[in-house]
Amino acid sequence: MRLNFIGKIKIKLPRHKKTKVSPKDIASAEPIEVENYDDLVTKISEIAFDNPHLNLYFRGQDKDHKNKKGQSSLLSQFYRRGSYTLPNKSQIDLSDKKKRKNYLENILPILADRFIDKLKKDKSLGIDRHQIKFIARFDESKWAILQHYGYPTPLLDVTKSIRVAASFATKNYKLDPPEACFNGGPGFVYLLGFPETHGYISYFTYEAIVITSLLGTCPPQAKRPHFQDGYLVGTIPHETSVITDFNNCLVAKFKIDKPKDFWSNNSQPMDISEIYPEAKVDRIKGIADSMKDDFRTLCGDLIPQEKKLPLSKRGLDA
């Protein structure tokens, strides 16, 4: 990714004398503290007004991940973690580029093709062949759906909704049983700048990035991506030898010190039913859930201490 396409950002950072800074300055600086949702919206609106050349997106996290230089780091979980939790709770090892390359080139394409096959066979979904052909045409559209239902891809989740990002920053939606509660520690909301999109899937060769709108690439039967107003960003070409940190696109970062006190009666976080709708409401979740065991079989070589099975029994000859 080219590092200079955002340019200088007009912003006042904590304990920082400059009024125009780079994304790397922001990644290295302390986050801007916000007391409540109204405060966050106000500060974002000020930054947006002062930087009209930027197309802004948001991301919420319960931890400010750092790179070796101590800067805020925005990586897809595909690159950030040594292991990845599968939808069936087992782990796969993605700790080095050889394993990530194997997953990206050999496993993810098979998984995506089988997902498309299930969409074709389930006539009750009401997705016609033209819609399925559109989803199947681009890797990003298939990956976007799979990632939102728990399967790893090299793309990074962002949103156009401040409320969605702030909800992920302040609440834990992945408890079992699924009952969201406020995080015990601080939450973080990131403001990122990308080029103006020109379609549901926008490729930018100069910046070497791709932006996918889930509203346009996911069928209406997939409720989760639509509720989350989700977008996915990645680099092009997709590769595992070079890891791109999207802190190169960082415009601002905010810290929510007390998640429980952040919301008020006038502004409430997203409900668990909106973030993760049940399968009876979200038909695509049912399709994704039905692939859990199949996916674990495909990932046999990446599961630590997994007894290796012949290829024919791992489903790789299908």
Image (tube, rainbow, N blue to C red):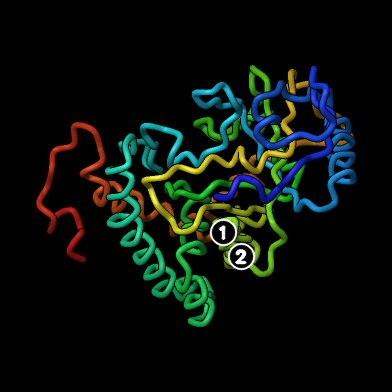
Q: Nearer the viewer, residue 231 or 86?
A: 231
Name the residue nearer the viewer: 135 or 97: 97
Residue beneath the point at 36% across and 41% down: 88
Give the numbered dot on residue 202: 2
**Circle 1 is placed at which residue position?**
210
Horizontal and vertical percent for residue 299?
27, 47
Name which residue lies at 13% across and 55% down.
Answer: 311
| Residue type beneath disc 1 | Val
Secondary structure of the residue carrying tag 1 is strand
Q: Check whether the beta carbons of the residues at disc 1 and disc 2 lie within 8 A of each other.
A: yes
Mark yes or no: residue 97 visible: yes
Type of residue at label 2?
A: Ser
Q: How many marks?
A: 2
- Sequence-earlier tag: 1 or 2: 2
Q: Name the foreground residue: 318 vs 102.
A: 102
* Residue drawn at point x = 63 percent, y = 67 percent: 200
Q: Is residue 57 above or below residue 209?
A: above
